[in-house]
């Protein structure tokens, strides 16, 4: 069930809270290097005279290193605090990309070492921000709206980031763009860790366990589902390139990706404008099902105008599903593992996206562009089936005192901590 949010309780209310706008902006800027990393590496390698195969290899190495580093750094944040991990990681990641920009691709082992360093130390700013929201915003309904705002802001970043990169390349060179983008990333991380909420935040005491956040069955179920959501999104990216090639108009690809982002933006804004009651796990199943259903019409591959409209539709439920997933992570992460748990979601989604891109390529070569979009539809449906099959596990959140109730460990706006938890809405 949903109700309209009061006028004073919308996104502006979130951004007016002390520290909120700074934390959101700093996190988005800090994540720029990772958001544009694949595109930046491709442009750099091609400018250096390297092949697309080499660019793909470096991107893969960067992606794998990021997937490994995110949960490890997230666990370190939970144990040591944000400033002691986020800023050094941001600096080391930037140094890795700077090493690549300054030495080029002439010595391949060094180039691969540079991108692995950059990926491995990509700071877990995304998970860190979500750990800060309860202390900054207090009331749980505001925290949930902040998750929706976060998902919307990501769509803006993934649109603006490549445009900024293209501008920097046109003004100077891909190497200069790599340096500037990563310098901005360090400045973004610096803005976050110098803020009062970040400096004073401490994770709740945690039970020593080698699995960390992964000992939660509910979290594992969620990660399994969002692996396939990521797979669907990754396959759409590759299939859209093939669609543009089929039409003989490369620019169509940009329009399709922009349309998908626009759909996610619109869906996220609409989702965050309402207050939702009921268990978020049940709501997430509905959102993922709607997401899968909206992927299916892409297999029709109509003309560019209609295909652009279908791309908008395919993105509408993406941001709402992500925002709802953030709430579910918050409810199922074991005590003291909130940043690590969010980092696992980022990692799983990213790995799924990479494998979706890899799976769509052979599918397109074997059966044409339609099959690439079919992979997306199948991924969405499997994600829904995973949530359906694990409904009993997801229906048992972690005990009270887990992340959403641990806002007392952060300095915020002075509002009461999340006392009206959705844990009792079953």
Image (cartoon, rainbow, N blue to C red):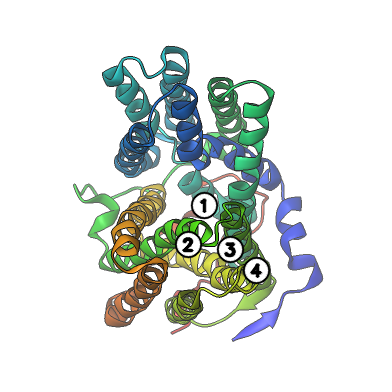
Dot 4: element = helix
For the point 66% across and 28% down, the residue is 170
Which residue is more in the foreground, 60 or 305? 305
For the point 36% across and 53% down, the residue is 341
Residue furthest to the left in view is 210
Which residue is more in the foreground, 21 or 91? 91
The image shows residue 273 at horizontal and vertical percentages of 70, 71
User: 259 above or below 117?
Assistant: below
The image shows residue 86 at horizontal and vertical percentages of 46, 32
Q: Quadrant of residue 384?
A: bottom left
Q: Which of marks 4 and 3 is in front?
A: 3
CA–CA distance between discs 2 and 1? 8 Å
Q: Can residue 418 be seen in this snapshot?
A: yes
Left/right placement of residue 389 relative to residue 252 reads left
Which residue is more in the foreground, 195 or 73? 73
Checking the image for residue 326, the label placed there is 2
Q: Earlier in the sequence, mark 2 or mark 1?
A: 1
The image shows residue 129 at horizontal and vertical percentages of 53, 47
- Whether pointer 1 and pointer 4 mark residues with C-beta atoms closer than 8 Å, the reply is no
CA–CA distance between discs 2 and 3? 21 Å
Residue bearing mark 3: 260
Checking the image for residue 272, the label placed there is 4
């Amino acid at each position: 069930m949903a109700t309209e949010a009061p006028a004073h309780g919308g996104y502006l209310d979130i951004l007016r809270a002390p520290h909120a706008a700074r934390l959101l902006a700093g996190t988005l800027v800090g994540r720029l290097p990772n958001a544009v990393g694949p595109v930046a590496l491709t442009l750099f390698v091609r400018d250096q005279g390297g092949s697309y195969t080499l660019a793909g290899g470096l991107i893969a190495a960067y992606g794998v290193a990021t997937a490994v580093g995110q949960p490890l750094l997230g666990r370190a944040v939970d144990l040591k605090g944000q400033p002691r991990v986020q800023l050094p990681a941001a600096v080391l990641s930037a140094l890795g990309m700077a090493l690549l920009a300054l030495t080029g691709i002439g010595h391949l082992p060094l180039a691969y070492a540079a991108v692995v360093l950059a990926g491995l130390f990509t700071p877990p700013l995304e998970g860190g921000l979500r750990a800060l929201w309860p202390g900054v915003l207090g009331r749980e309904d505001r925290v949930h709206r902040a998750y929706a705002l976060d998902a919307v802001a990501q769509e803006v970043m993934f649109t603006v980031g490549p445009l900024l990169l293209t501008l920097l390349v046109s003004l100077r060179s891909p190497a200069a763009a790599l340096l500037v983008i990563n310098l901005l990333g360090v400045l973004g991380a610096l803005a976050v860790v110098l803020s009062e909420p970040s400096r004073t935040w401490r994770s709740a005491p945690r039970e020593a366990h080698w699995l960390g956040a992964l000992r939660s069955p509910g979290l594992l179920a969620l990660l399994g589902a969002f692996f396939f959501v990521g797979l669907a999104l990754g396959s759409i990216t590759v299939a859209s390139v093939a669609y543009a090639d089929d039409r003989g108009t490369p620019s169509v690809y940009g329009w399709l990706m922009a349309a998908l982002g626009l759909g996610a933006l619109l869906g996220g804004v609409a989702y965050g404008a309402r207050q939702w009651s009921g268990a978020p796990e049940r709501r997430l199943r509905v959102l993922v099902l709607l997401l899968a259903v909206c992927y299916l019409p892409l297999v029709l591959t109509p003309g560019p105008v209609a295909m652009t409209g279908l791309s908008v539709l395919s993105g509408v439920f993406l941001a709402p599903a992500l925002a709802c997933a953030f709430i579910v992570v918050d409810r199922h992460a074991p005590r003291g593992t909130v940043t690590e748990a969010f980092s696992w979601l980022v990692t799983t989604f990213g790995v799924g996206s990479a494998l979706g891109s890899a799976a769509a390529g052979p599918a397109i070569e074997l059966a044409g562009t339609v099959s690439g979009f079919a992979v997306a539809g199948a991924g969405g449906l499997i994600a829904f089936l995973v949530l359906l099959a694990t409904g009993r596990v997801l229906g048992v959140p972690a005990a009270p005192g887990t992340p959403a109730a641990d806002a007392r460990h952060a300095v915020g706006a002075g509002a009461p901590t999340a006392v009206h938890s959705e844990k009792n809405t079953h």
